[in-house]
Amino acid sequence: MPEQTPLSLSEDDLARLSASERIRYRLVGANCRYHANDNIAEHIRPGEIDELKAEVQQHLQQVLQSLVIDTDSDHNTHETAKRVAKMFIEEVFRGRYVAMPAVTEFPNFSRLNELMIVGPITVRSACSHHLCPILGRIWIGILPNEHSNLIGLSKYARVCDWVMSRPQIQEEAVVMLADALQDRVKPDGLALVMEADHFCMHWRGVKDDDTAMTNSVMRGAFLKDPNLRREFLSLLSKKNAA
């Protein structure tokens, strides 16, 4: 069972809690899920990110001690806990703690309705099972209509990074990305293909360096029209062969 925080605390009581406990209190009170790949930015108040980093640093220092690493005399690991805490909060898991990046939208004045493909976009994530890196590429197919919102090319990369910068499993990550883009662009059709290497395969376990994972999400016209789907996939094949 997930840790539960009492839901009848005063402001003074809340002030005495750690940052993680205060944030969890708000999440539970709002009946919001806070799984590894969820964004919880709405429930974080100014200044609490720095508190979280300090709290994570403290716990990571205890992990290093439990691994019997002498961080006092070992100059290589003296500030490892601080560096890793900053990396988790500000970089590799940043997509959990910040709001979706601003995405400027433009009306489809030219009434574009032909297939557009964006990619490959390089993405970096982490396996939520072992917190090992996931390194991959994403291709996005968009079939706009006259009412669709057009967004800049770089914005696709920013939204990808926001979704992927969390502990994930690839199958769920592409669905979350599809949901975010569908909500922003509102196209007639949306297609995603992601191909990635998982270091939980390369680095541990079977230690297989040749296995990658590819999966896709098809929405709207891409799901209903096999010719459009074939066109999208064939163009990806040509790009990979070039």
Image (spheres, grey):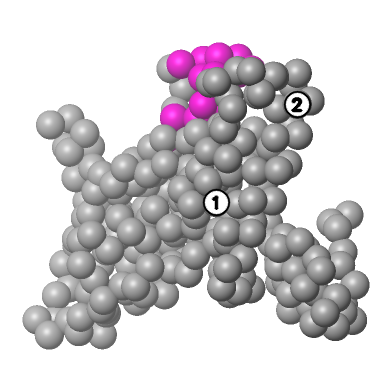
Can you identify the residue that label 2 sits on?
65
Q: Is residue 32 magenta?
A: no
Q: The disc labelled 2 sits on which kind of residue?
A: Gln
Q: Is residue 241 left or right of residue 87?
A: left
What percent of the width, then of the height, locates residue 203?
54, 19
Q: Is residue 210 left or right of residue 144?
A: right
Q: Is residue 68 left or right of residue 216?
A: right
Can you identify the residue that label 1 sits on?
89
SS state under label 2: helix
Q: Quadrant of the N terminus?
A: bottom right
What percent of the width, then of the height, locates residue 114?
16, 67
Residue in view at x 80 percent, y 74 percent: 14
Q: Quadrant of the C terminus?
A: top left
Residue 127: give its label: none
Q: Earlier in the sequence, mark 1 or mark 2?
A: 2
The mark closer to the camera, 1 or 2, is: 2
SS state under label 1: helix
Q: In 3D space, how far apart are the residues under numbered discs 1 and 2 (Cα atoms)?
A: 21 Å
Crowd band around label 1 with a 10 angstrom C-alpha radius: few (<14), some (14–19), many (20+): many
**Along the line of sight, the residue nearer the viewer: 227 or 215:** 215
Seen in the picture, residue 90 relative to 204 is either above or below; the reply is below
Seen in the picture, residue 61 relative to 18 is either above or below; the reply is above
Seen in the picture, residue 235 relative to 40 is either above or below; the reply is above
Seen in the picture, residue 61 relative to 167 is either above or below; the reply is above
**Along the line of sight, the residue nearer the viewer: 126 or 56:** 56
User: Magenta residues, as a range?
Assistant: 195-209
Crowd band around label 2 with a 10 angstrom C-alpha radius: few (<14), some (14–19), many (20+): few
- Evaluate whether residue 111 shows in this view: yes
- Evaluate whether residue 234 shows in this view: no
Residue in view at x 70 percent, y 27 percent: 64
What percent of the width, then of the height, locates residue 197?
44, 30
Choose top left, top right, bottom left or bottom right for residue 39. Answer: bottom right
